[in-house]
Amino acid sequence: MQRTHIDGVPVFSADGPARTTASLVFGVGLRDETFATIEVTHLVEHLAMAALPRTHLRCTAVTDVDTTTFGATGRPEAVGAFLEGVCRALADLPTERLDVEVGVLQAESCSTPHATAAGLWAARFGLTGPGLVVAAGPGPEWLTEQTVRAHARRWFVRGNAALWVSGPVPPGLRLPLPPGPRPERPVPASRPQTGPVWTRAGRSGVGLLLTAGGAADPALTLGVEVLKERLRDTARLARGLSYCVDSLALDLSADRREVAVVVDARPGQEAEVAGLLWGACTSLADAGPSGAELAHAVDGFAEELDADERVVVESELADAAYCAVAGLPFRPVHDVLAAWRATGPERVAAALRATLPTAVLAVPEDCAYAGPGEPVVRRSVCAVQDRLPPGRTFRPSLLARLVSPGERVALVVGERELASRDPDGDVHAVPWERVEAALPGPDGRAVLVVGRDLCSVLVDDDRYGRGAVAAVRARVPADRWLPRPASRVDEPAEVALQAAVVPPADTVARL
Ligand SMILES: [Zn+2]
């Protein structure tokens, strides 16, 4: 692997076939947005691609949780022209196309490939950082040209980019990105936790999230490999309860990694699978893997490295570029393999044991599951409580409450917080200083108040009587009250309000 610089951008390359495969990687993704700006990175990516001339080149662009990537395969000159075009477009986005691209995003259902992991991240972080992946956000039509340009100017800069090239580096390649340093990426605060917790999140799949130190320690990675293998043996092969066992590591900094193990489950079998997942994890943490299990994991890795040289080279190049933009130390795969070989069962057990106090076990919302028992405590995904705080109380009319059980709700605009009680008696509260965004409805008679702890409260004058929205508006910090987008949207108010009701443990719907 060679390492050079072009126009201030680090370039990792390796000789290969006559065709060039290249990827320009930026250290920005969903985790760098806020609830109000969800999809802004994706919109920047779309605008940049839309600015390029029509081509038959095989090219793609992907916005993920922590990176945005523009890639192409083809003749070296064509790939070079693509990369240069992307850089020029990012430096001056064709925002005259904003409305069109917003429409494209609205049509493209942005379902996340990591639905189970998203629920786990939200349980860990609430509506910040990777936790944002769980939310749909207000919708791209709420993004202004100013917001989009500011996002591009901050993140799509020389200091936050890296390129990897497999095959010939395009002759005379230029990467004319705007100058700028790699922005600081704060690690979001975790919800306080003193031991393992379990929660209900999402619609399907069972997951386990563990907080670890940096990527450098192979013991936890190995432990997770063995854990997945045990689950394949029990949940899949022996009992036919699930099909797919996977893991996903997210490096939030050089010494902070979140590892998610996700297992799909046959409908109705989620509780069973959650029990197997927790049981396998704790028994590994307790007694460690067997020698045979460790050897199997190490051999599997060695075989992967042996299989297809091109694939290995390209994944290593991609890893080097990723580490450069993420500020992580890069380690060649053969070093990693050597470290795996040198790791014994005691260290694997110790690494798993050390992460157990951070464990979040998640089952789907509607799953009949009582948790694994002591010492794992139940955590509600949002900050649900059982009584309304003091404050000015609003209720639907007496008639509405008598006729319809769904109207037996209440809203409190208090000194310290906004709260609503749903028909089941659960109270969802948003302290004023924890308001992430307030999204007014089309006619000003409703507002959805979204809290950082995943509670949200729909305030609707038509339901609670006049004055409720005004009372809330007087309390919400002014910079949290989002201006409605220019009236591109003409849906009737009732439809918007219906969609705004937010199931606490799930995707935050659009207003
Ligand atoms: Zn809540």
Image (tube, rainbow, N blue to C red):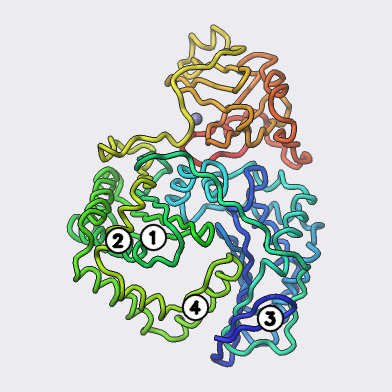
Q: Gap between marks 3 and 4, in whole Å? A: 18 Å
Nearer-N-terminus badge (2/3): 3
Q: What element carries label 4?
A: helix
Q: Gap between marks 2 and 3, in whole Å? A: 40 Å
The disc placed on residue 247 is 1
Tell me the quarter of the image containing the N terminus: bottom right
Q: What element carries label 1?
A: strand
Nearer-N-terminus badge (1/3): 3
From the image, tell me which residue sits under label 4. 316
Front: mark 3 or 4: 3
Would you say 77 lies left or right of 306 here? right
Nearer-N-terminus badge (1/4): 1
Tell me the quarter of the image containing the C terminus: top right
From the image, tell me which residue sits under label 2. 228
Q: Do the residues labelled 2 and 3 touch (CB within 8 Å)?
A: no
Quarter where residue 97 is shown: bottom right
Please name the amino acid that badge 2 sits on: Lys
Nearer-N-terminus badge (3/4): 3
Q: Gap between marks 1 and 4, in whole Å? A: 19 Å
Would you say 253 lies left or right of 200 here? right
Query: Neighbour class for label 3 at 10 Å: few (<14), some, many (≥20)?
Result: few
Q: Gap between marks 2 and 4, in whole Å? A: 23 Å
Quarter where residue 68 is shown: bottom right
From the image, tell me which residue sits under label 3. 5
Nearer-N-terminus badge (2/4): 2
Q: Is residue 68 above or below residue 394?
A: below
Q: Is mark 3 on a helix, strand or loop?
A: strand
Please name the amino acid that badge 4 sits on: Glu
Query: Neighbour class for label 2 at 10 Å: few (<14), some, many (≥20)?
Result: many
Q: Are marks 2 and 1 in contact (CB under 8 Å)?
A: yes
